[in-house]
Image: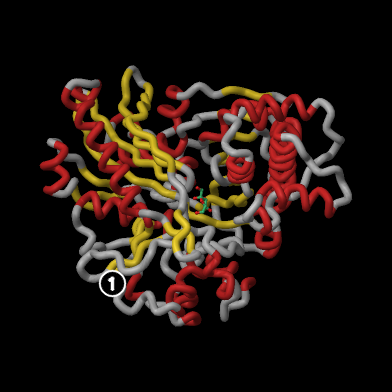
Amino acid sequence: MADYYLAVDLGASGGRLILGHVEGGKLLLEEVHRFSNAPQRRDGSLIWDVDLIFSEITGGLEKCAGWIKGGPLSAGTLRSVGIDTWGVDYALVDREGELIAPVFAYRDSRTEPFFKTAIPYEELYRISGIAHQPFNTIYQVLADRAAGRFAKAEHMYQLPEYFSHRLAGNLRSKEYNEYTMASTTALVDAEKKVWSKEIFEKLDLPLRLFKPLREPPYDIGCLSAELQKKLGFNARVVMIASHDTASAVATVKEGSLYISSGTWSLLGITGDPVLSGAAREAGYTNEGAHNGRIRFLKNIMGLWVIQSVRHELGDAHSFEELEALAREAGKTAPAGWTIDLNLPQFFAPSSMIAEIKAEYRRLGQKAPETPGELAYSVYTSLANCYKIAIADLENITGRTYPAISVIGGGSKNSYLNALTAEYAGKPVYAGPAEATAAGNILLQMKAAEDPAVKSGFADLVRNSFDIKEFSY
Ligand code: LFR
């Protein structure tokens, strides 16, 4: 009888439920359910429809019931479920476990007036190590407090916690905040790994909504009685490294340079906190890793840019087609035809294509016009952003990294991988594409004391995934 684990991996543009189990020394992953996700525009705000997302999660669990009866799972047991999501967003819940405010999406503009705090940013960075981004939880909290949304709130649920406690039917009782996700708030002391007393006091924030931090993995219960009845099975609910990037990075060998490539490209290393002025000026952030270490990384605008371009082109081209068109356009493109995709205008533009063209024009360069030129300009600009971020990282840490591990869905983009290797002048090792789900499952296996991860994750990861090399 194999032990199965279910990863619920929720991203800003889509969610997946992935079952994992070990067979023949390999971690095998099977997708049970997939759905698309996007924030909804309501009364001028960008909001996550958490009921819709939750119904997709339970719909996926119902599919698992089928697998348990007749399918692959009939030969095993589903031990646990773990949920990861994007960072920084949260749900405010009252004493009865009811939501008392919309769950705002991180690209919503309500934080703009609060982007500067009473604490100078240099000081904030010295404590939290978190890069200056308008979407950070700290600015969302300031905006929500000003709007009076905390008055009836009892808990600040980080999103994976909200969905996990809802699965377990215990939204009224919550004892902890999961550390890796909390580290994205800019409210945590990066060295001490606790909510920063200094920040809470200086900004007069309601500490009562925040629970003590706990390092993953830990168990928060099992599926609610109502769900068990509906599904005909039970499983534990485990808090894993619930920030999606922390889950993904759990598959990377410590010390390696990685790019977790998805809606965002997160480029960095795992090690000790770096809170220097150079790190701050280069836009590097210090987030918590699955093993209590720090993910020292930079948020680069990522595939969000090409996703937006594709959408504006009427969703007429698949990503594979755009890749092929980009290759073609690259044959005649001007040399050095790149822009800085990390400029704020690319964060939530009303038209990504218009902003890209405007930036090329501002630089006095030819603007991309065709879908192929647009895709080429996005991919080369991303590769160039990687090159600059790596040079900064090597300067800050005083180390040279011999290769780049590209993990996550974006690692399937062989054109971008080749450009990355070429621009950075380092080999790229691409995969696993399912790094986030794999990392999520590895932490569940750790919680279950599964013998396959007794001596760490590295061996199982190495045996399980095909890694493609792109030389330069
Ligand atoms: C990636 C990610 C990044 C975080 C961004 C916003 O999905 O979690 O790590 O900075 O989304 O939450």
Q: Vertically, is 244 above or below 68?
A: below
Q: Quadrant of the C terminus?
A: top right
Residue at label 1? 154
Name the residue nearer the viewer: 109 or 140.
Answer: 109
Residue found 81% across the figure and 48% down from its top: 360
Q: Vertically, is 348 above or below 75?
A: below
Residue 56 point in image, percent of width and height: 32, 42
Name the residue nearer the viewer: 275 or 119.
Answer: 119
Residue 218 point in image, percent of width and height: 28, 50
Please indicate whether residue 61 sits to the left or right of residue 244 in the image: left
Residue found 47% across the figure and 48% down from its top: 12
Q: Is residue 424 visible?
A: no
Name the residue nearer the viewer: 247 or 134.
Answer: 134
Q: Residues within 10 Å of mark 1 (few under 14, many from 20)?
A: many
Which of the 4 image quadrants contains residue 447? top left
Q: By what rule are the colours in the image chosen?
A: secondary structure
Indicate the secondary structure of the residue bearing disc 1. Answer: loop
Q: Is residue 278 visible?
A: yes
Q: Quadrant of the N terminus?
A: top left
Residue 453 point in image, percent of width and height: 35, 33
